[in-house]
Image (cartoon, rainbow, N blue to C red):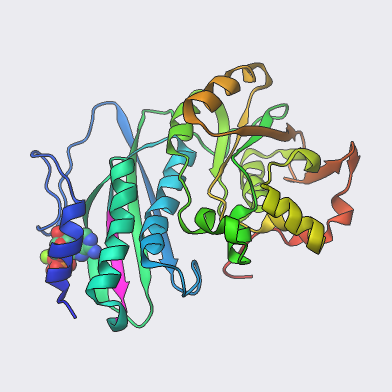
């Protein structure tokens, strides 16, 4: 069992690659120079064992995902990720070389990929494993992509596939990587700057998260069930279980849902090429302040047949 200070020194300081004008791990606080004409976007996400990830999740994945969910929030804002802090509440039984090495390597692997720097944090003993990361990114002044600016007539897009994260939770083998080590759509978010009229990352389920955009923007939506992008595994799962709502409500996708003006449609193909992420138009924003979502199939509204969709998305408190 290592002491708090040796844990920080051995496992977390190596993640912190900081330039000479800034101060990172080792003092009471981090000191960061601010780029001119930029705004800071700040996001925080907590991951608790048994709530946000199953107990059997490998420690590499726990580290990766704790950072990924934060980078995903930054991506949804169109922010360029820069640095993050890590508050780790660690049960005594996980305070060992093997667990800490795998956990910190999971964080480092993703941090290196997106060149984000660990600048500080807190390390405490706890009965439950809990990881809180606060991540910071930059946007040029007044360019951040918000939830509140979707307009009736806009097209609604999602990146990648929906449902795989939830499929991983159900134990579907081919979905486990998507559940454990989701790829935050950072590059996509950056490319949506000046294009998307609104965006959100899908963490609680497509319907629930799209509804946040609709509420904030005081509009409604119509989405076409027949074109929802799903992996073969999820299509098979739906066929076997007849749980048609599953990909709409399961959550843990960490894809982006965003809206664009119809006349910008031609720009989507170039962004798909640039980011190597498929983008699917799943419907459109319509007028109506009630944030209603009509789901259609074969041009007919089928929402009533998808009853359980009414209980859309993961919520912590009902
Ligand atoms: P204090 O005694 O002032 O609370 P700490 O002992 O908690 O300071 O932290 C010492 C230094 O180590 C600080 O720079 C802090 O940001 C950093 N630190 C502590 N825990 C972590 C962690 N889990 N990851 C990264 N940096 C950490
Ligand atoms: Mg101090």
Q: Where is residue 199 drawn, in percent x and y?
A: 56, 38
Say whether residue 245 is visible: no
Report the side of 97 relative to 231 (left or right). left
Q: Where is residue 316 drawn, in percent x and y?
A: 57, 68
Say whether residue 36 is visible: yes
User: Quick check: 312 above or below 227?
Assistant: below
Count the labels in the image. Answer: 0
Report the side of 273 relative to 227 (left or right). left
Report the side of 279 relative to 101 (left or right). right
Could you say which quadrant of the image residue 45 lies in? bottom left
Q: Where is residue 151 drawn, in percent x and y?
A: 66, 29
Could you say which quadrant of the image residue 245 lies in? bottom right
- Residue visible at 18% across and 42% down? 32
**Magenta stretch containing residue 317, yes or no?**
no
- Residue visible at 27% across and 55% down? 85
Split into quadrants, the picture shows ligand 2 in the one at bottom left
Locate the N terminus by quadrant. Answer: bottom left
Q: Nearer the viewer, residue 68 or 198?
A: 68
Report the side of 301 relative to 78 (left or right). right
Locate the C terminus by quadrant. Answer: bottom right
- Residue visible at 80% across and 40% down? 226
User: Quick check: 15 above or below 219?
Assistant: below
- Main SS, magenta region, reads strand
- Residue visible at 43% across and 33% down? 187
Q: Nearer the viewer, residue 271 or 238?
A: 238
Could you say which quadrant of the image residue 81 lies in? top left
Q: Where is residue 157 drawn, in percent x and y?
A: 64, 34
Q: Report the magenta residues as a range.
A: 85-91
């Amino acid at each position: 069992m290592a002491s708090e200070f040796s844990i920080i020194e051995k496992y977390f300081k190596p993640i912190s690659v900081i330039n000479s004008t800034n101060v990172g791990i080792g003092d009471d606080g981090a000191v960061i120079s601010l780029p001119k004409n930029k705004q800071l976007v700040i996001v925080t996400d907590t991951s608790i064992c048994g709530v946000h990830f199953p107990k059997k999740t490998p420690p590499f994945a726990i580290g990766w995902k704790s950072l990924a969910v934060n980078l995903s929030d930054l991506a949804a804002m169109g922010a360029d990720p820069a640095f993050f802090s890590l508050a780790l509440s660690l049960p005594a039984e996980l305070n060992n070389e093997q667990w800490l090495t795998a956990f910190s390597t999971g964080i480092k692997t993703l941090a290196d990929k997106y060149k984000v720097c660990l600048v500080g944090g807190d390390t405490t003993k706890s009965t439950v494993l809990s990881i809180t990361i606060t991540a910071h990114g930059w946007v040029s002044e007044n360019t951040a992509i918000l939830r509140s600016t979707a307009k009736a007539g806009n097209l609604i897009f999602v990146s990648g596939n929906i449902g795989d994260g939830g499929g991983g939770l159900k134990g579907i083998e081919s979905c486990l990587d998507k559940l454990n080590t989701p790829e935050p759509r950072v590059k996509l978010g950056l490319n949506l700057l000046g294009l998307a009229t609104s965006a959100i990352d899908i963490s609680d389920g497509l319907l629930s998260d799209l509804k946040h955009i609709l509420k904030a923007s005081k509009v409604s939506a119509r989405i076409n069930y027949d074109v929802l992008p799903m992996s073969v595994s999820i299509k098979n799962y739906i066929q076997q279980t007849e749980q048609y709502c599953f990909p709409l409500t399961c959550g843990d996708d960490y894809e982006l849902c965003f809206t664009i003006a119809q006349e910008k449609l031609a720009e989507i193909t170039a962004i798909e090429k640039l980011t190597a992420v498929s983008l699917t138009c799943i419907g459109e924003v319509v007028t109506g302040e009630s944030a209603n979502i009509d789901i259609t199939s074969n041009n007919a509204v089928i929402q009533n047949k998808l009853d359980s969709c009414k209980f859309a998305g993961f919520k912590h408190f009902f």
